[in-house]
Image: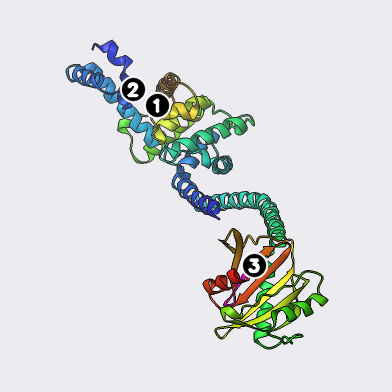
Amino acid sequence: MFLGLINKSNNKEFEELLMQYTDSLFNFAYRMTQNSQDAEDLVQESSIRAFKYFHKFKTGTNFKSWIMTILRNTFINKYRKASKEPPKVALEKVEGFVPATNVSGAEEEVFGEKMQYIVKDLPEELRTTLSLFYLDGFAYKDISNIMNVPIGTVMSRLYTARQTLKKKLIKYDKKENIKNELPGN
Amino acid sequence: MNCQEIREHLYPYIDGELKGSTVEQIKEHIANCPLCSMEIRNEKDFDKIFRSCFPMELASYDFKEKLLEKVRNESEKSNIFSFKFAKPIAAAILIVLAVVYMYGSLKDPAVLLSDATKTHISMMQEKVAFDISSSDAKEVSSKLQQKLDFNVSFPDLSKEGANLKGACVCSINKKNAAHAIYVYQGHKISVFMFSSKEKKIRSAKKVTLNNRDYYIKNEKGYNSIFWSNNGIGCVITSNLNETDLLYLIKQIS
């Protein structure tokens, strides 16, 4: 009876925490799987796993970081093996880079799409590191825990991702400029 | 700190991962270095743009509802799993307790006292017919002795003010017993004698008088006291209080 009450109380606590972070989980899963259906499946599977191991979660520690780690591990164990990643986007399809400071409205939307294409083309480790840092606001240490890599690796991946993005954006900006300068344009 | 050192700390600084004097040194440097200041500003702009390119992908309401349902199903499954084992364990414990209780009840001769109380109540309600109507203790004992296979010896308590009214054979704990009725200060008293191997009643209150153990129990407002002497069990039952009954017993013993 007493144990039953404890379980009930723990279940409620888990449900509340899960609902609080479902959007973050889905967002993170979407960045990794790159499609809504796989993201939902990943969140569901990870949530069930987290529920089963909730007794191991230490109250007062970071639940978001804890469940993100489970989600990340679930992704590695299942989805990555299944090679569900979408085909990489050919760089030629990415349109020219427009300097961000000058964009607005429709142009900003187009720029955003270009950036997303480029990010999708990054290796999964870099993409996930970017997502955890920029979109979820995790510190290096949290990312290190979630991805189970040293902090130095997190810093290195972030550096590589940033440099790669910049290079690709600049490269396409140049290509577009050349195209624009060709006769007939 | 020079420009090269600033570049080494550039991203941790922008990302808010640096603390203490390093942050102060960087701030001091960029305040006086337009090149590093511009580089940091560009990086911060890039971060801002990058974040704006990736709007938060929100989970649908339907999905959240479905997710909650799945978790609750899982919770029920785990409860069923625990109940699956809890029920047989609880049943086993109950069986063990029942066996222990029944064994204890069988071993504990408290039924002697219950039977005595019931018979006394029947006598009070005049449902019991006296086979022997006599106030002579020796005569009563002698007549009962003919019907029973153990030594029957009711005491003469007339000096103590308890007068014998009669006697009969009854059943205590499924055995034949001698039942004598006394009247003491207007209270009827039943005295039972029977062959008995029992010497103690665990569930009754124990009192020791003159190196002999007495077991007292109150049922339905009547006090019954059991004691054993040389294989003969005796019970005295009445609505008298314990002290008065023990006083009479002391005279009998």
Residue B96 pos. (x, y %)? 70, 54
Label 3 sits on what residue type?
Phe
Pointer 1: what residue? Answer: A140
Residue A79 pos. (x, y %)? 60, 33
- In the depicted view, which residue is nearer to us: B69 or B113? B113
Pointer 3: what residue? Answer: B226
Label 2 sits on what residue type?
Pro
Name the quarter where the C terminus of chain B is drawn: bottom right
Residue B223 pos. (x, y %)? 58, 74
Task: Classify mark 2: helix, strand or loop.
Answer: helix
Q: For the residues marked 2 and 3, what is the alpha-carbon distance in whole angstroms?
A: 90 Å
Task: Classify mark 3: helix, strand or loop.
Answer: strand
- Give residue B177's quadrant in the image: bottom right
Crowd class of label 3 (few under 14; some 14 to 19; many from 20; radius 10 Å): many
Q: Chain of mark 1?
A: A
Contact (CB < 8 A) between labels 2 and 1? Answer: yes
The lab-note entry on whether marks 2 and 1 share a chain reads no
Label 1 sits on what residue type?
Tyr
Mark closer to the observer (2, 3):
3
Task: Classify mark 1: helix, strand or loop.
Answer: helix
Magenta-colored stretch includes residue B200 = no
Q: Can residue A134 be seen at all in this image of the molecule?
A: yes
Residue A86 pos. (x, y %)? 58, 32
Q: For the residues marked 1 and 3, what is the alpha-carbon distance in whole angstroms?
A: 82 Å
Q: Is residue B213 left or right of residue B174?
A: left
Pointer 2: what residue? Answer: B12
- Give residue A80's quadrant in the image: top right
Magenta span covers which residues? B220-227
Q: Chain of mark 3?
A: B
Contact (CB < 8 A) between labels 2 and 3? Answer: no
Contact (CB < 8 A) between labels 1 and 3? Answer: no
- Give residue B116's quadrant in the image: bottom right
